[in-house]
């Protein structure tokens, strides 16, 4: 069982304030991430969304754990009705007028290893597409 976190970094042709808004504003998040009924970048704020794999939908349950304005956002990530809890963090760094985003998703090994939807490579593929295509296209359009 691989306990290594997934760590991905991408650099966007966008100012930190724009990237921060994209990862913390529910209306913007709906355009590149998931549709959330509500989201606030406030420690303790709970939110959820449905997303699936191969036709099976999962209710994602999340709680914001850390907020450093325009620098870091972190939240727990678990699934209703399934064991395990992980944490996702987005860290932002200014780089020559652009923004480098570092995503870390740790704790994946706590999810049921016998459920292929929770396989590490699925998370890796999902985050690669979300950061490398969806968010990039949203920010740089």
Image (spheres, rainbow, N blue to C red):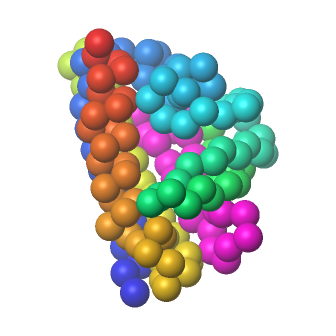
Q: Residue at x 28, y 16 (%)?
A: 140
Q: Quadrant of residue 66?
A: top right
In the figure, is residue 123 to the left or right of 70? left
In the figure, is residue 83 to the left or right of 105? right
Tally the marks: 0
In front of the other: 49 or 57:
57
Q: Residue at x 55, y 60 (%)?
A: 56
Q: Position of residue 87 (x, y in %)?
A: 56, 59
Q: Main secondary structure of the magenta part?
A: strand
Query: In this rendering, does residue 61 appear at all?
Result: yes
Q: Position of residue 49 (x, y in %)?
A: 66, 44
Q: Residue at x 50, y 57 (%)?
A: 55
Q: Is residue 19 above or below residue 124?
A: above
Q: Residue at x 50, y 78 (%)?
A: 115
- The N terminus lies in which quarter of the figure? bottom left
Query: Per the image, is 87 magenta?
Result: yes
Instruction: State the extent of the magenta-drawn residues as a range.
Output: 68-93
Query: In this rendering, does residue 93 appear at all?
Result: no
Query: Per the image, is 11 magenta?
Result: no
Residue occupying the far front of the picture: 55
Q: Is residue 107 above or below residue 7?
A: below
- The C terminus lies in which quarter of the figure? top left
Q: Position of residue 139 (x, y in %)?
A: 35, 19
Q: Position of residue 124 (x, y in %)?
A: 33, 59
Q: Quadrant of residue 125?
A: bottom left
Q: Quadrant of residue 57?
A: bottom right
In front of the other: 11 or 53:
53
In the figure, is residue 75 to the left or right of 2? right
Q: Is residue 20 above or below residue 74?
A: above
């Amino acid at each position: 069982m691989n306990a290594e976190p997934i760590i991905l970094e991408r650099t966007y042709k966008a100012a930190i304030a724009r990237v921060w808004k994209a990862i913390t504003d529910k209306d913007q998040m709906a355009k590149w991430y998931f549709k959330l009924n509500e989201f606030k970048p406030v420690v303790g704020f709970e939110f959820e969304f449905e997303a699936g794999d191969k036709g099976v939908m999962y209710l994602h349950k999340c709680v914001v754990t850390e907020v450093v304005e325009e620098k870091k956002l972190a939240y727990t990530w678990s699934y209703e009705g399934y064991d395990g809890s992980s944490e996702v963090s987005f860290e932002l760094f200014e780089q020559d007028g652009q923004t480098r985003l570092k995503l870390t998703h740790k704790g994946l090994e706590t999810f049921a290893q016998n459920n292929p939807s929770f396989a590490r490579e699925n998370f890796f593929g999902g985050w690669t597409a979300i950061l490398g295509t969806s968010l990039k296209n949203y920010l740089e359009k």
